[in-house]
Image (spheres, rainbow, N blue to C red):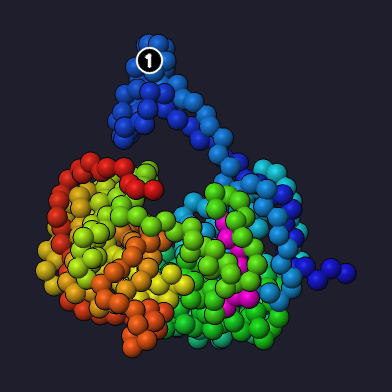
Amino acid sequence: MSDAAIQVEGLGKKYLLHHQAGGRPRYVALRDVLAGKFKGIFNRKSEIGNRKSVEEFWALQDVSFEIKQGEAVGIMGRNGAGKSTLLKLLSRITEPSKGRFELEGRVASLLEVGTGFHPELTGRENIFLNGAILGMHRAEIKQKFDEIVAFAEVEKFLDTPVKHFSSGMYMRLAFAVAAHLEPEILIVDEVLAVGDAQFQKKCLGKMQEVAGNHGRTVLFVSHNMAAIRQLCGKGIVLEAGKIKFSGKAADAIEAYSGLVRTAHEVTFDPKPNKPSITLVKINPEALGHGDLEIEITFQSPFPLNPPVPGLAIHSVSGVPVFGSNPRFHKEGYVPSSIAGGVVAFTFKGFPICGGRYRLSVWLGDWHTDYDHQADVLAFDFKHGEISTNRPNPDSVGYLDGDGFWEIKHQGDVSSTQGAS
């Protein structure tokens, strides 16, 4: 009998992308759609200018690997590499376009906040609903119920419909249910990106317990290389929908770090009907003088009141070095309700050792995060010299200081093509 928990052979997922003839379509409001339909009744020729071309896009292609029972495996890759698509296939949320896979045992998936929760049901009811979906008997769920509630720290809101939960409460309960209902395979996508540091530590500890003490299989997608190094023995790196590397976790982390391009600016396509980061720039001259200057250009279909950007800096090996957003670096940040523009972060005399680092950025408002671009670029910080008398960047840990945010421009901002 095979000891494989997950077997994947030639797996692929194809999507059809529809393009408007004549270039990128403008934003279309509901009134435009209705007006177009009305005109079309009288003039069928109006459809000629609306013809669309169709393009095949392989989000995942020819992916094959095997994971043994009891292994914890980290899945790494930049945004758009195919990580989430792979997990959706293995969780049977979507069907593959080609290839096959086999899973041995009961699977619990946590792919995004509140996956599998019914918003109108209470926290208590959703615990039993998720257990039933996993094929557990009511008696089994009741046996684990108190542990789930204690871990999630939502006792006061247990009989409240989860649609009233904050994103943090949602995630705590969702993770607690997924981890405590004893699946043979636990699939987790970026759970450590939500919640405070204490909760992140609890999540990581629980996954270690599930994988180590109980001998269950964990498939863990994260941009947090330190968490992957701590939890996983093996790693798989995806690039453009294909496996770039598969092997020991430490070697996989090194391979992933090599994919993060060194650049001073990077552009992104805006997400439809959602606030989006479109350009990230870092000032190379400031870096040479020991300062940090970063600009984030964004656009939104509705005003953000105010826009709340964020950034995180990690060492090449994934150790968190510094993070900031106006929620806790408020001094000098004047809130303004705007639907697009440029926000900037400046830190004079940035107190880190010389070396190479990775930058990730966020965009949201006071309550919600809308866009997250992980590891957008790598940069070299040349201030100071590394010597035997100075600590290695991996040992620096979190920093704090007098960095400040400001809104530099408001309104539509034309961006230049980013460096590659």
- The residue beneath circle 1 is 46
The quadrant where residue 364 appears:
bottom left
Q: Amino acid at mark 1?
A: Ser
**Horizontal arrangement in the rendering, residue 60 relative to residue 190 (left or right):** right
- Which one is in front, 290 or 71? 290
State the residue at coordinates (58%, 49%). Answer: 241
Helix, strand or loop status at disc 1: helix
Name the outermost residue toward the right. 1
Name the quarter where the N terminus is drawn: bottom right
Q: Is residue 121 something that shows in the picture?
A: no
- Which one is in front, 259 or 172? 259
Q: Position of residue 226 (x, y in %)?
A: 48, 76
State the residue at coordinates (35%, 76%). Answer: 321
Q: Position of residue 282 (x, y in %)?
A: 26, 58
Q: Position of residue 127 (x, y in %)?
A: 56, 73
Q: Which residues are magenta?
A: 231-238
State the residue at coordinates (19%, 74%). Answer: 349
- Which one is in front, 158 or 177? 177
